[in-house]
Amino acid sequence: MGELGNFPPETMAIGRLDEKSEGLLLLTTDGTVSEHIRSKSIEKEYYVQVSGTVTDEAVTALRAGIEIAQSSGTHTTLPCSVHRIAEPNYLGPPHRKRSESHGPTSWLNIILTEGKYRQIRKMTAAVGYDTVRLIRIRIGNVLLGTMKSGEVEELNIL
């Protein structure tokens, strides 16, 4: 593992993380690899902290698929895996600290096979919960593990 360094000019991110999200980001110089990893055959796993105490009904709705707004209209998300989890204790500090005076939060583990723009944030909002923290922890068989922000590790994944 090393620190963020110089990459070839043709380096591209596989998928994206918005400015408020954290976690695993894969880089490549191979468009075929990028296309394969972005496909619906590869799972993307997230830890998601939301405002409030998540209900069973909300978890069921998230699992079944949620209608969300997209630039081209609306999209119903594919069924996915959603589970309540305890707060992960090995994550680094959040980018922004949330005051406890804002009330309780819940943590979810969400596994998707698609990745629409801001999909998880839109999904949780559609069932009444704002996303406070979003961390991608896995893409396919590649795990974030204990890597810290800015660390880089070279992989051979295909």
Image: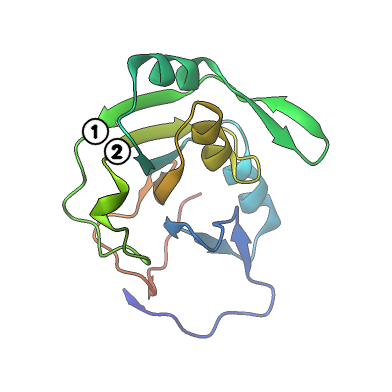
Residue furthest front as drawn = 101
Q: Residue at x 19, y 37 (%)?
A: 86
Dots 2 and 1: beta carbons under 8 Å?
A: yes
Q: Nearer the viewer, residue 157 or 46?
A: 46
132 horizontally vs 18: left or right: left
Q: Residue at x 58, y 63 (%)?
A: 28
When asked about the image quadrant of residue 131, the answer is: top left
77 horizontally vs 1: left or right: right
Q: Separation of disc 2 and disc 1 at Cα?
A: 5 Å
**Three-letter amino acid code at the position of disc 1:** Ile
Residue 52 x %, y %: 33, 35
Residue furthest right as drawn = 72
Query: Residue 71, can we see it?
Result: yes
**Pointer 1 local density, CA inside 10 Å: few below 14, some 14–19, many at least 20:** few
Which of the labelled discs sits on residue 85, or is there none?
Answer: 1
124 horizontally vs 150: left or right: right
Residue under label 2: 107
Q: Residue at x 31, y 64 (%)?
A: 97
Residue furthest bottom as drawn = 6
| Disc 2 secondary structure class | strand
When asked about the image quadrant of residue 104, the answer is: top left
Residue 61 x %, y %: 48, 16
